[in-house]
Image (cartoon, helix red, strand yellow):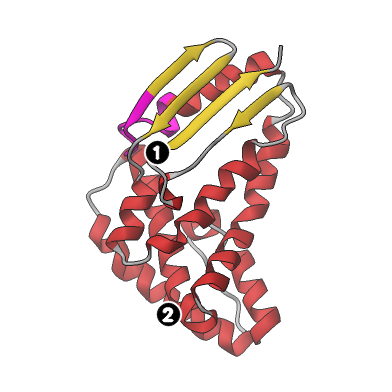
Amino acid sequence: MRKQKYTSTQKSVGWKRAYKIIAEKYGYDTADKLFDEASDLFAKYSTRYNNERGVRKGHVMGAVATASLYIPLSDLVGQEAAVDYIAESMKPASVAKHNKIEKFPAPVFMRIAGFISTRIFSEKAGFKRRWLCNINHEKRYDLLTCPYVQVFSDLGCPEVCPAVCIQDDISFRNLKNGVVFERRGTLGRGDECCDFCFKRQV
């Protein structure tokens, strides 16, 4: 075992937790070797996206970090198990987000939901959006393009995208502040769009 160092992007997509999971199950030697391969891939793939800027860069590099870990992991455990490990590694951050945002009263959260749609999931960030409803007590829209889908496809591992998609479900479902999150499908799961709907219970 040796102490692993992670970039902020790698930390944000669960590399630290993934290392612990893999080391506990397969041993530290295997984990160290896998993360060496993942780090090499991250350095290699990052150069493809040097021209990315702003909020889009955050999404793109998050996808790059995820793919870089997933590819050697899938060689070790197979695609299905690797997707599950990636999803599990990301989960604590999504649970923390869920616990934080459900503390906001519903009217405040709905304003936050507006910010999420126009800033974090904006066209500048790489998401083409189709608004269906944009009023105080309901924010409903479809995302027609997604940088995660694009990057995973570019890097030859589109099957890992559902591990990212499920983080929205963890973050936004079952909120206790009177806001309901509804979703039918995602691009990463093969659906025609990623639909978002935040509604205040009335």
Would you call the spot at circle 1 few (<14 residues within 10 Å), some (14-19), or many (20 or more)?
many
Identify which amino acid the numbered label 2 is placed on.
Glu
Residue pointed to by mark 1: 193
**Percent from the top left, x then y, of residue 70?**
47, 69
Residue pointed to by mark 2: 37
Q: CA distance from mark 1 to mark 2?
A: 33 Å
Out of 6 and 137, give the one closest to the viewer.
137
Q: Residue at x 47, y 33 (%)?
A: 195
Which corner quadrant of the image does residue 96 belong to? top right
Q: Residue at x 65, y 13 (%)?
A: 107
**Is 151 within the magenta?**
no
**Percent from the top left, x then y, of residue 147?**
34, 46
In the rendered image, the quadrant that contains the C terminus is top right
Would you call the spot at circle 2 few (<14 residues within 10 Å), some (14-19), or many (20 or more)?
some
Q: Residue at x 36, y 72 (%)?
A: 41
| Magenta range | 118-130
